[in-house]
Image (spheres, rainbow, N blue to C red):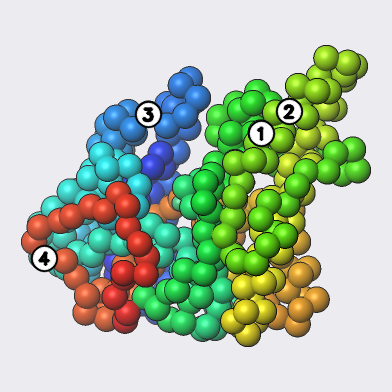
Amino acid sequence: MRVLGIETSCDETGVAIHASGAGLLAHAVYSQIELHAQYGGVVPELASRDHVRKLAPMVRQLLNDEGLEGHDIDGVAYTAGPGLAGALLVGAAFGRSLAFAWGVPAIGVHHMEGHLLAPMLEQEQPPFPFIALLVSGGHTQLVLVEGVGRYRLLGESIDDAAGEAFDKTAKLLELGYPGGPALAQLAQHGDPARFRFPRPMTDRPGLDFSFSGLKTFALTTWQQNAPQATDSDRLKADIARAFEDAVVDTLLIKCRRALQQTGVNSLVMAGGVSANRQLRDAVAQMMSKLGGRAFYPRPELCTDNGAMIAYAGWQRLRAGQHETLGFDIRPRWDMQELPQI
Ligand code: KG4
Ligand code: ZN
């Protein structure tokens, strides 16, 4: 079974084909970063219009590159939520229509389920049950995963998501948009001993997160030190390092707690922030110390992409799940409501 996957929940247009046996045949991502950079953030209407422009040519190109035609595709999966309503509508309308034209089933996929299952696209697949740490621009969640569609939310961010905190802190340090990767790069040159940022909500029980205070902490540290700083690049790097250390440490503390609470010893990490080198290394180190195992996708499959949607859709379509002829989007969507397979 060959499934075409379409991702348009935010500012990346992603397309991919996943096939039974062969796995991921091909994928392509077009990032709208340049389009939104001048506004310092994603402009939803511009995002939708750009998805409209890019989707058809990207799907055509993908099929051509693989020597495939429409009748070689057995199902279409599109992101149905959560995300920007207009952007989701573009992918859903396009995907549902293509499936209708080709006479194949279609399925709306949960974006975070896509992230969560992305490590399955790698050679070594995590065994169920596992704990998933989902760290993206919109979500920070700890999920107990007992199978596809068997998700129990253990904790989540009560304010900014980890990626959002990276982006906002980068913005106040004037590192451009989206600043997460730039901040991470700068942090590599920072002095870890100069500042110590708090590890929010780690001194009380529970698995929820709160990252918005770290951004304020970064701002105050900047304001207090910038006037007398002789080297402001150095100061920015040291703040970036203290911020990143605090985020990584906080995520690790909560992951360890989730593993202990559930008695599970495999940890999956996915979503844009899981591309962060320091976080990947720290998680791997922690899991080897705990005698467990860590799994994460290759960096290009950590951020938004069509491959994870094709894979999640393939799992559901081959189990017989599909949509009616209509289509629906869910800008807000609790992953725990998804059906099991
Ligand atoms: O999963 P994703 O591509 O989109 C959402 O579903 O939100 O995640 C994007 C987020 C952004 O906030 C971005 O700054 C962050 O992931 N990100 C990173 C890194 N690469 C992407 N944050 C820290 N370090 C990175 N290397
Ligand atoms: Zn995402």
Mark carried by residue 220: 2
Q: CA distance from mark 1 to mark 3?
A: 24 Å
Residue labelled with disc 3: 43
Q: Which residue is mark 4?
A: 324
Question: Is residue 251 found left or right of 57 in the rendered image?
Answer: right
Question: Can you identify the residue that label 1 sits on?
Answer: 216
> How far is disc 4 from disc 3 in space, using C-alphas?
31 Å
Label 1, label 4: how many angstroms apart (C-alpha)? 47 Å
Amino acid type of disc 4? Thr
The residues tagged by marks 2 and 3 sit, at their Cα atoms, a distance apart of: 28 Å
Residue 77 in which image quadrant: bottom left
Q: If you read the primary sequence from the N terminus, does the residue marked by circle 4 or circle 3 appear first?
A: 3
Residue 31: percent from left, percent from top: 45, 38
Q: Secondary structure at mark 3?
A: loop
Q: Residues within 10 Å of mark 3 (few under 14, many from 20)?
A: some
Which three-letter amino acid code belongs to the residue tagged 3? Answer: Val
Is residue 237 toward the left or the right of residue 271 in the image?
right
